[in-house]
Amino acid sequence: MASLYDKPVRALMHDMVRDIDLKPDTVISRDRVRSWFRENYPKIKDGTIAAHLLRMSVNSKSRVHYGAKPGEDDLFFQVDPKHFRLYRPQNDPAPIYPGDDAEQAVQEEVQELAEEGSPEFAYEKDLQNYLARNLHLIESGLTLFEDEGINGLEFPVGGRFIDILATDSEGNYVVIELKVSKGYDRVVGQLLRYMAWIRKNQTEPGQSVRGIIVARHISEDLLLACSGVQGVQLFEYELSVSLREARLE
């Protein structure tokens, strides 16, 4: 998605630091950052601002999903979930950057688990990464949310994180929550809270929000809890393996 203003949000973050004259030891809150953007660039949504704060915080593990670039995105150090200060290269740990082998590692695990007859992923992160790259398995036309280099993996919503935020073929939001093993009824409240946050802070007029829960097994309690809820779908996943002939030289 193109920038709403003449500069991308990552550049505006640097402008904010200069504008408020942020000192190296001064801690700034996420709310203060949002306030600056509301005053100067009101079209930029809260979720995009929160995601860029994480993308540009050298110690945030979430930045690996957002394509953080050395130097350009090494601006902040995250003190706690809601507070940040400037990055100090001489004192702070080395920045975290995205790994190039993440996708291959996930594909290899899917293959190994399927060959061993294992019915489920070992970790929720593996299921998350696999589905993010294969959203068509859930629904044709479903794509990972993208906005100025920020994608829908671990998308921040009021101090919490959506497993996968996607958009469908009509441009509506789809909130996806994952459970590697059994999905219980308590996940419904979590999903509905995320859907409400996206509806309030992220949607444009005419856009809708719906939710999807993916688990290895859907419990009877979860089926019952969702039976009277509109806009929520349930999916059970199953690992499989396919073969292709290796050509001999």
Image: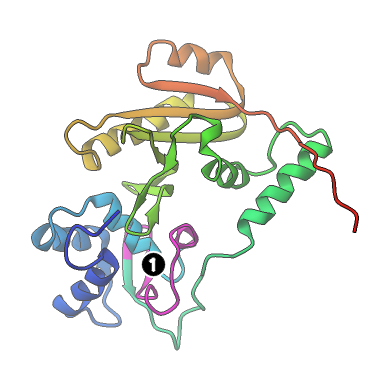
Q: Position of residue 28 (x, y in %)?
A: 25, 68
Q: Which residue is mark 1?
A: 78
At x 71% / y 43%, what residue is drawn?
110
At x 19% / y 57%, what residue is drawn?
4
Asked whether, in this view, residue 201 is left or right of residue 242, the answer is: left
At x 68% / y 55%, what residue is drawn?
105
Name the amino acid type tagged 1.
Gln
> Is residue 49 visible to us here?
yes
Dot 1 crowding, Cα within 10 Å, few <14, some 14–19, many 20+ = many
Q: Is residue 72 magenta?
A: yes
At x 9% / y 60%, what residue is drawn?
39
Query: Where are the magenta residues, as a range?
Result: 61-83
Q: Position of residue 222 (x, y in %)?
A: 51, 18
Q: Position of residue 177 (x, y in %)?
A: 48, 35
Q: Position of residue 173 (x, y in %)?
A: 33, 35
- In the displayed structure, would residue 177 be above or below residue 89? above
Query: Closer to the camera, 42 or 147?
Result: 147
User: Looking at the image, which residue sits at the far left?
Assistant: 39
Q: Is residue 242 magenta?
A: no
User: Looking at the image, which residue sits at the far right?
Assistant: 248
User: Looking at the image, which residue sits at the far front?
Assistant: 249
Instruction: Name the image quarter holding residue 102.
Output: bottom right
Asked whether, in this view, residue 113 is left or right of residue 161, the answer is: right
